[in-house]
Structure formats: C-alpha cells, structure tokens
C-alpha cells in the first residue's frame, strides 16, 4: 500500500498580500502613505471630473474601482523593487534574478567562479547562449567561459552581459535578456542544451527571499 504525501494547503491570497506588504515595508520607506497617496490622487481626479460633469455617483464608483486597481498595480511594482533591493550586492544575486525569469529560458548558475567571487551564469534560449557576469571584475572569467562554450556549441550565437556595468543592473537584467534578438528555433535550443551538458557545473548558494513574478528553478 503506497502512502501519498499530503499536498500542502494553498496559501490564501490575503495572507500572501500581508506577507508581501510586511516584506516590502522593510525595504521601502512610508509604504502605507505612498499607497494611500496614490489611491487618493487618482480618486480625486476622477471624482473631480464627475463633479464637473454632474456625474458624481457614476464617476465616484468608477473612481473608487480605478483607484483601487491602480494602487494594487503600484503596490506590485513597489514589491518588485523591494525584492530586488533585498538581494542587490549579494553574491549570486544575478543568478537569483535569472532563475525567476518566465518563459522558455534555461538557467545554469555559476558555470564559472573565481577566487575573487566573480562569476558567470548561463542562460540558454531562442537568442542562443547568454553569459551573464557579476562581481567586481568578471571580464576575464567571461572571456574564458565564452571560449569554453564556443567549443561545445560551435555556430551558436553567444552574448555577454555584465551586471553592474552600463545599463545592465539587477533591476533590468530580466528585461535586457528578453530583448536580445532571437536566432534559434525551439528544437535548436534543445540541441544546444544537450551539447552543454558536458560542461562542468559549479554549485552556488543563491540569495533567498521573495522574488518578483515567482521563483523558477533552472531546468537542465
């Protein structure tokens, strides 16, 4: 007789909101006032139009629902910013952000690490191979990993990003990866992943904590 592991109960939405607010309030000053201010400004504008048009009841209701939706959206953005701020500067922060990316992206953290805690993470997707360096000076490590990956995946486009230099920050890393032009078909992405399985893998502790859009573990 087989014993099935009981499925853990789903967390109620209001519990999630409470936990997210508690976390975000530690990173963002005056969070409650910001949310209240956003709601009040939007409602005042719409309700003011209702008074001018003599449609106070209709635009009052519309103003309340619209203000609530905009405030919730604003809260989501603030929570996202707080999540990034909580891990910014930690070793492996870029890997944590990459692991949370949605879509057909295959992330392998720390394919290269040196004694100075510089590291390179690999993302495989439709653009090809994306090597993401982080640390004080990951340039040499990026060059080494580019050569190693070129040997195992000849002809596959290899892109390099360095977190902390230029426009690539922890906050816009996911967006930057997604903007790279697509070069491979889905079947070719699978083939590239198989070729790269022969490369050595390095275990890396990734910063823990809430991540925007849900955490996704790397698929290999």
Image: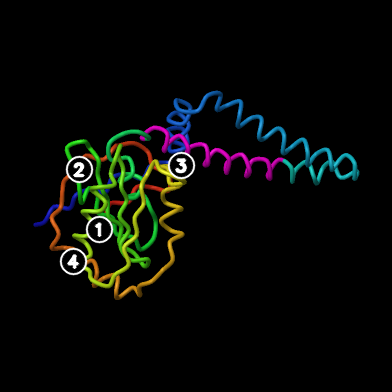
Residue 31 at x, y percent in the picture: 55, 27
Front label number (3 vs 4): 4
Residue 207 picture quarter: top left
| In front of the other: 130 or 88 | 130
**Which of the numbered marks, if any, corresponds to residue 204?**
2
| In front of the other: 7 or 161 | 161
3 and 4 marks in contact (CB < 8 Å) = no
| In front of the other: 214 or 68 | 214
Residue 128 at x, y percent in the picture: 33, 66
Left or right placement of residue 139 versus residue 81 in this view: left
**Which of the numbered marks, if any, corresponds to residue 49?**
none
From the image, which quarter does the C terminus lie in?
bottom left
Disc 2 is placed on an element classified as loop
Kindly report the distance in space between the C-alpha atoms of the residues bearing marks 1 and 4: 9 Å
Read off the residue under disc 3.
13
Q: Is the magenta stretch mostly helix, strand or loop?
A: helix
Read off the residue under disc 4.
151
Q: Which of marks 3 and 4 is nearer the N terminus?
A: 3
Left or right placement of residue 75 versus residue 213 in this view: right
Kindly report the distance in space between the C-alpha atoms of the residues bearing marks 4 and 2: 24 Å
Read off the residue under disc 1.
146
Front label number (2 vs 1): 1
Which span is picked out in magenta?
64-87
Q: Earlier in the sequence, mark 1 or mark 4?
A: 1
Front label number (2 vs 3): 2
């Amino acid at each position: 007789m087989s014993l099935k592991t009981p499925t853990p109960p789903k967390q109620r939405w209001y519990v999630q909101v409470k936990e997210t607010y508690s976390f975000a309030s530690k990173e963002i000053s005056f969070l409650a006032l910001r949310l209240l201010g956003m709601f009040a400004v939007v409602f005042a504008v719409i309700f003011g139009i209702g008074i001018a048009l003599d449609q106070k009841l209709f635009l009052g209701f519309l103003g309340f629902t619209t203000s609530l939706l905009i405030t919730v959206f604003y809260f989501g953005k603030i929570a996202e910013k707080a999540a990034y701020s909580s891990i910014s500067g930690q070793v492996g922060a870029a890997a944590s952000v990459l692991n949370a990316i949605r879509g057909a992206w295959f992330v392998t953290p720390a394919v290269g690490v040196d004694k100075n805690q510089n590291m390179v993470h690999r993302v495989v997707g439709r653009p090809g191979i994306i090597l993401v360096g982080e640390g004080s000076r990951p340039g040499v490590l990026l060059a080494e990993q580019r050569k190693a990956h070129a040997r195992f995946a000849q002809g596959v486009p290899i892109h390099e990003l360095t977190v902390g230099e230029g426009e690539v920050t922890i906050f816009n890393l996911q967006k930057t990866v997604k903007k790279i032009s697509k070069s491979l078909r889905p079947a070719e992405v699978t083939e590239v992943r198989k070729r790269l399985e022969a490369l050595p893998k390095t275990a890396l502790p990734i910063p823990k904590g809430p991540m925007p859009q849900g955490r996704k573990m790397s698929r290999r």
